[in-house]
Amino acid sequence: MAVQDDKREIQMCRLLKLQRGTTRGGIDAHLIVGVKTLKYAVPIEVKSTTNDSVSTARDVGIEHTCKWRQRMWLFGFYDKKGKTLERLLCLKPSQMAPWIDKIDAYIKPDFS
């Protein structure tokens, strides 16, 4: 089972200077890009784990996968104790699309 932890995700956001989201279930973080008067917030889904798998939201539905298709994904892989960040992986929405497509196919019968 993958273990997710807010402390680790906060650490990852600080390390990469991401702006943390303010609500549970909303956008996890934003990467602010641009110049003084023209800024854009890139939405990022942040996940952390102490093994090679990552968990997602409970009760995943169409609303989740629609949101996920619009976000960058940041994965933090920590040691077994969850203390040391060993590596980061950042993926574009297009790179996550095959996985999201599988989730959509799996949940589609429940929403038909």
Image (spheres, rainbow, N blue to C red):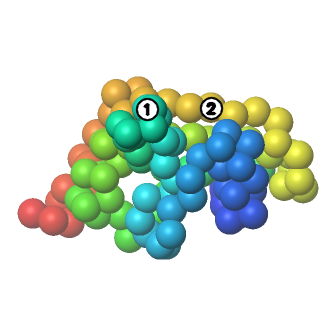
The C terminus, quarter of image: bottom left
**Residue hosting label 2:** 89
Whether residue 58 is situated above or below residue 92 in the rendered picture: below
**Residue at (36% x, 64% y) in the render:** 60
**Residue at (84% x, 55% y) in the render:** 82
Residue 22 can be seen, yes or no: yes
For disc 2, the neighbor class at 10 Å (few under 14, some 14 to 19, many from 20) is few
Element on which disc 2 rests: strand
User: Marks 2 and 1: in contact by CB < 8 Å?
Assistant: no
Expressed as whole percent of the image width and height from the top left, the position of residue 111 reads 15, 65
Q: Amino acid at mark 2?
A: Leu
Question: Alpha carbon of mark 1 to alpha carbon of mark 2: how far?
Answer: 23 Å
Residue 96 can be seen, yes or no: no
Give residue 34's mark. Answer: 1
Nearest the camera: 82 or 31?
A: 31
Whether residue 7 is situated above or below residue 101 in the rendered picture: below
Whether residue 26 is situated above or below residue 81 in the rendered picture: below
Expressed as whole percent of the image width and height from the top left, the position of residue 24 reads 49, 72
Whether residue 68 is situated above or below residue 97 in the rendered picture: below
For disc 1, the neighbor class at 10 Å (few under 14, some 14 to 19, many from 20) is few
